[in-house]
């Protein structure tokens, strides 16, 4: 179900996603262009670790355990995300495809040019 509009949305899983848990085609838009990025919650893990380190003197080291737990939970527990370039669908808890790289500005500029050219070639009368 779409959170924005509330409509049911058909998801098109392919065989590699079902059997090997590897994303090679978007289940929402059927696109094949993806990039890899870190989960945003990883920064929160570093904040917990730094807070535990800064309070360690006043708490006699107890805050180090809490900070270490927060660091583990938010930094190591959350893996990298696979994100679709076209519809920005995020795939968590799946194995990384070796063909997907980090975010590429040149590739995005190329995609935007293709979209812009497609819009100018249509006749909108």
Image (spheres, rainbow, N blue to C red):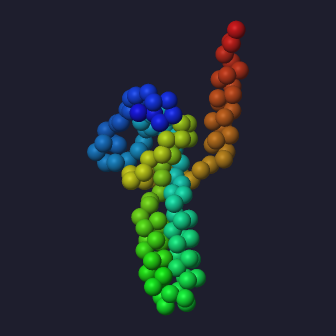
Determine which quarter of the picture holds residue 24.
top left
Q: Nearer the viewer, residue 11 or 120?
A: 11
Q: Is residue 7 visible?
A: yes
Q: Nearer the viewer, residue 39 or 116?
A: 39
Q: Quadrant of the C terminus?
A: top right
Residue located at (48% from left, 53% from top): 81
Q: Quadrant of the N terminus?
A: top left
Residue 28 in the image: x percent, y percent?
45, 34
82 lies above or below 52: above
Residue 121 in the image: x percent, y percent?
68, 18
Residue 7 in the image: x percent, y percent?
44, 27
Residue 34 in the image: x percent, y percent?
51, 44
Residue located at (38% from left, 51% from top): 94
Which residue occupies the extreme top position in the image? 125
Residue located at (41% from left, 64% from top): 77
11 lies above or below 61: above
Q: Is residue 30 visible?
A: no
Going by the image, does 110 lie left or right of 32? right
Which residue occupies the extreme front position in the image? 58
């Amino acid at each position: 179900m779409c959170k924005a509009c509330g409509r049911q949305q058909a998801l098109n899983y392919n065989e590699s996603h079902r059997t090997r848990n590897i994303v090679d085609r978007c289940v929402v838009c059927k696109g094949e262009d993806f990039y890899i990025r870190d989960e945003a919650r990883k920064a929160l893990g570093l904040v917990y670790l730094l807070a535990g380190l800064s309070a360690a003197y006043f708490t006699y080291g107890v805050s180090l355990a809490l900070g270490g737990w927060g660091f583990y939970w938010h930094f190591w527990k959350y893996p990298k995300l696979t994100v679709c370039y076209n519809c920005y669908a995020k795939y968590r808890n799946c194995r990384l495809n070796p063909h997907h790289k980090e975010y590429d500005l040149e590739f995005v500029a190329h995609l935007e040019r293709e979209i812009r050219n497609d819009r100018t070639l249509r006749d909108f009368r």
